[in-house]
Amino acid sequence: MLEGKDLACVRGERTLFSHLNFTLNEGELLLVQGANGSGKTSLLRMLCGLLTPEFGEILWRGEEIGAARETYHAEMAYFGHAPAVKEDLSASENLDFSCRLAGIPVDSDEVKGALGHLGLGHCLNLPTKSLSQGQRRRVALARLMLVKAKLWILDEPLTALDQAALQLVQTLIGEHLRQGGMALMTTHQPVMITGIVPKTLPLTP
Amino acid sequence: MLEGKDLACVRGERTLFSHLNFTLNEGELLLVQGANGSGKTSLLRMLCGLLTPEFGEILWRGEEIGAARETYHAEMAYFGHAPAVKEDLSASENLDFSCRLAGIPVDSDEVKGALGHLGLGHCLNLPTKSLSQGQRRRVALARLMLVKAKLWILDEPLTALDQAALQLVQTLIGEHLRQGGMALMTTHQPVMITGIVPKTLPLTP
Amino acid sequence: MTGIAMHWNSWSEFLHMGGYAFYVWGSYGVTAVLIVGEILLLRAHRQKALTLAKRTVKYGKVEKEEGNDEIAA
Amino acid sequence: MSTLQIVFVLLRRELMLAMRRRGDVLTVLFFFVIVASLFPLGVGPDPKLLRLMGGGVVWVAALLAAMLSLGRMFASDYADGTLEQLVLTPTPPVVWITGKILAHWLVSGVPLILVAPVLGVQFGLSNEALVVLVFSLLLGTPVLSLIGAIGAALTLGLRGGGVLVSLLVLPLYIPVLIFGAGAVDGAMSGLGSEAHLSLLGSILILAFMLTPWAVSAALRISIE
Amino acid sequence: MSTLQIVFVLLRRELMLAMRRRGDVLTVLFFFVIVASLFPLGVGPDPKLLRLMGGGVVWVAALLAAMLSLGRMFASDYADGTLEQLVLTPTPPVVWITGKILAHWLVSGVPLILVAPVLGVQFGLSNEALVVLVFSLLLGTPVLSLIGAIGAALTLGLRGGGVLVSLLVLPLYIPVLIFGAGAVDGAMSGLGSEAHLSLLGSILILAFMLTPWAVSAALRISIE
Amino acid sequence: MNSINWYKYSSPATFYGLAGKLIPWFYSAAALFCVAGLYLGLVLAPTDFQQSDAYRIIFIHVPAAWMSMFIYVVMACWAALGLAFNTRLSFMMASALAPTGAMLTFVSLWTGALWGKPTWGAWWVWDARLTSELILFFLYLGFMALQAAIDDPRRADRAGALIALVGVVNVPIIYFSVRWWNTLHQGASVSMTKAPSMAAIMLVGMLVMALAAWMYAIAAALSRARSIILEREKNSQWVAQMVEAEV
Ligand code: HEM
Ligand SMILES: Nc1ncnc2c1ncn2[C@@H]1O[C@H](COP(=O)(O)OP(=O)(O)OP(=O)(O)O)[C@@H](O)[C@H]1O
Ligand SMILES: Nc1ncnc2c1ncn2[C@@H]1O[C@H](COP(=O)(O)OP(=O)(O)OP(=O)(O)O)[C@@H](O)[C@H]1O
Ligand SMILES: [Mg+2]
Ligand SMILES: [Mg+2]
């Protein structure tokens, strides 16, 4: 479904990778692996359409993602290094607005449910600036549950999370895959999702 | 020599720690331990005199560090989260200026020696903005070698370093201690310095 | 206060202020509004602080009174 | 959801954020007032001279205040990742960009329009000139937000962005300044200000149609 | 090393850094020129009017440019940890603070002084007035750097720092503006400008003796 | 520490209770003086032969102008005390005074403008006294904006205190420079009419109103200080006990 063909990435004056090929089908998880600075974030941003590849093309259901921008973005959710959470809004306001802006109207029960599922039930209405780093990332993760995208692109979703949250996120990904979703992620931590054998994609210069 | 008596620290509205006591003598290493956000950096900044303790006092050779500011700062070196390296200056210019500003005139051979020892011999004259994160921290570490302070206060000196550099830094600390220096550091990584049994100082609220 | 009598002959004269009603009452009126406004804001501030304190007490985040906290106490 | 709904949601969000950080909004407003008040102090208290300068000074102060408030337009969204998420919505960028510019104008342009008459009074402008001043600002400040957005988008994440953006944007502001201040002068001198105001109006329409595209391109460049 | 040597090393470092990022310095200079040039555009081309305003406008532009350049004074040192290291040197903070303020003035005040005569000519100032303008800037811009340093130090690391610093600093700049512009006006009107210049001089001496202490206190507060 | 007793009085908990008892008294005094002053000024005082009844603005204008300057000085004194002795209460008093001071500054500007239009024919002239009052307003706003921009209360306190002190050093400089600026040029077509030799009753009325403004300012500042204390000390034992006792 998502295909990368002969991709190359150049940042500054360095070629980070080249001749990269992969396919990702329904129910599959692709782990992008590599050292610090090897270009994982760059690859993920490329797959979102935020960065233009130096060479090669990226296909979504056989179409180039630039050409199919609207349908592609409607089916995709990106979780980046920055949590995309406004410090002055509360967790539920944040979620509400980000879903609406993505074109998905949600009601407040859904929002509450998602936040409760991620263990934020007691701080729905606090401004997020008084939440800890890990809690903010949970707010961002709750968005994934609401947006109901087909393809998840996750950049280090496991950092800053404690043991319980780690487990939760992995279960979340597992369920998503079992329901026919696909996911592509990077992480420096071990990933264990019951019933799923992830494909790996090593990045080397 | 360095003594903390009944120290307490309040950040924002939270008391991070209180009733903290310790002594650090020549040749000793004190490891400050605690979870994220437990106040390690705050304690170290307090010991530098950058932060005023909410309660308690800090003594250097029996004198309050505020009163003995000049002598204390002349004998102390701090290595913080931020590497204190100017991106637009080269590694050797950076070192040269920072030593001179600390009141220690150095000649260029010494600077070259220190940078060479830390494996930066080949990029003495590049502006530091084109160095990687780990290399920048090495530049900052080279300053410790030149300033010849009695007391080292090191905040996570081991992050962003690769295996070889880790080894090097620990050897450096070991030598410093054997020559009668003292060091106080925080880290989330295991520390192994031959011949030294570090004291530990756990931080709990 | 003998020798000082009420200056005005009628209400309307008082309100008219010798033709300067707009300026005089404009001054007094806006000042009154500002003072009442400030008092209302002060009350709102106090209510907010009280609810905050109550919530804090309810969630049990109260620190133990510490011997070395006499500056804080 | 329809395009209009998206703009509406965005506006609500931006206004809510502005309410939560009222301080920022007020600070820009007072900057405007202070800058305008500096001029009499520099030039001297002669009322005749001040009356002649009034419109121009208020307009220059508005330009500078608008320029300083540009930092807020995309920077925080860029820093916390919201901007990326907006780019990744299926909505065409031009739509939400228009919404953001509109919000910026509501938050930092409209307050200027509201206090401008007070400043005008301080400079001794006639009543008619005060009305024209307000009208010219009503037509001109949206243009400042629109053009400024391009500069703000281009300088995202650059060091020294503040001064740089002024260099990019101030020259583009000059036509607005000329027609805006010209309208007020026209009203003061009795020459009439319709011509100036209608030129401002056409600049507004032009800017409204073109700049969102330019901003969209600029954001793509900055986000890469 | 002696105190003087430390100041000298610091100056060398700051100037070297300024050379490496010439763009920043030039941008402030252009801002100065653009702001001063906006006025004739806003006010109209009447030469008499412009002559009357000239000194005041150049001085206001200098104030605004100085204010915008304040962001550079401590911010990057604060962000990369250099400021902490400076605080931790045995040298008394007042010494290196004086050095930094001096460097700031050399980098952003002196260029203004050099181009000011050109702007003065644009406004039709007399030769004598041009000389006085340069002198008044020579005495006044160091005060702008000195007072500005307090604002810059207090707003370190705050969001919206740019506009905030202007709110803090511009009111305090007013005496400098009044005497500076007054000196130029005095020269233009033939009333003489010695009184104004000597007042500027006394303000400079006062500021030079007091502000480093205030800045030192402000930095301690902001670094905590 | 030999000044334990002193600390006790400056302790927010003690102050909180004390202020709570005092506030009603100050409010009552303010209301009393205000009623008396208004009666004197609006009802009893005769019409001024020069300015007709427009002069009655004086009964708020002058008290507000006096208090606006006085409060700034008091605020700076609290700030200095706070920086010198590190007492948190002093900082809180400084922040509590600022909004009231700014409000009164605005009142004096507003009433002055409304007075100026009938007497001078202009809402505003760039007169020395007017201009320095305007700058005082900016100084208040700068203080408040700085405190609002800082999240950490400790830093906010100290930074605010420092800018208040810098401001108070500058106030005389600003005042004299503005005066000088204005009198040197003397281009203004209107100049401040000399204060008319006031009838005794006007003077008394004005003084009574000034007292009212003073009492009000104290009451408002104390009340704001109490809320600030409550916000800052919400984690402490005494607030918990107090809140629980109240519930
Ligand atoms: C916006 C305009 C005005 C402002 C900002 C203003 C400001 C002030 C200030 C700051 C004071 C106290 C000064 C001191 O005690 O030294 C004051 C006092 C006074 N003002 Fe105004 N004023 C304004 C307009 C007027 C007007 C239009 C009049 C009357 C024609 C007026 C009459 C007075 C009088 C009689 C006093 C008391 C005299 C004294 O104590 O020296 N003011 N004003
Ligand atoms: N905007 C940019 N301009 C120039 N170079 C860049 C830019 N962004 C990133 N780089 C460089 O590209 C390289 C790869 O960065 P990237 O963020 O993709 O790494 P990564 O694999 O995600 O690393 P990490 O594990 O630390 O997240 C780095 O060397 C970085 O310096
Ligand atoms: N300027 C500040 N104002 C308010 N709170 C602060 C400030 N600086 C730090 N804190 C808070 O103090 C706590 C301790 O911070 P500190 O940096 O000392 O932690 P740390 O032990 O060094 O953590 P880490 O292991 O992540 O480095 C954190 O909860 C932080 O939010
Ligand atoms: Mg990455
Ligand atoms: Mg730390």
Image (cartoon, coloured by chain):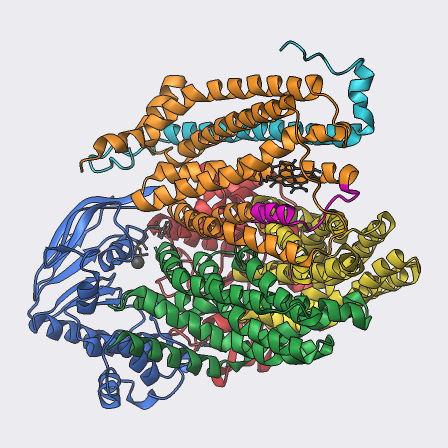
Chain colours: A red, B blue, C cyan, D yellow, E green, F orange
The x and y percentages for residue F202 are: 65, 24
Residue plotted at (34% across, 88% down): B123
Prevailing secondary structure class for the magenta stretch in the rendered image = helix
Q: Is residue A20 visible?
A: yes
Residue stretch in magenta: F120-138
Asked if residue F226 lies left or right of residue B118, the reply is right
Residue at 41%, 75% (x, y): give it: A37
Q: Quadrant of residue F119?
A: top right
Residue A69 figure quarter: bottom right
Q: Is F125 left or right of A27, judged from the image as shown?
A: right
Q: Position of residue B110 (x, y in %)?
A: 22, 87
Which part of the image, by quadrant, shows the N terminus of chain F?
top left
Along the viewing direction, whichever of B144 and C40 lies nearer the viewer: C40
Q: Position of residue A186 (x, y in %)?
A: 44, 66
Q: What x and y, as percent, mark residue E165? A: 52, 58
* Left-right relation of A193 to F11: right
Work out whether residue C22 or residue A49 is closer to the camera in this orientation and state it.
C22
Q: Is residue F84 left or right of residue F23?
A: left
Specify whether residue A68 is in view.
Answer: no
Residue B165 located within the stretch drawn in magenta: no
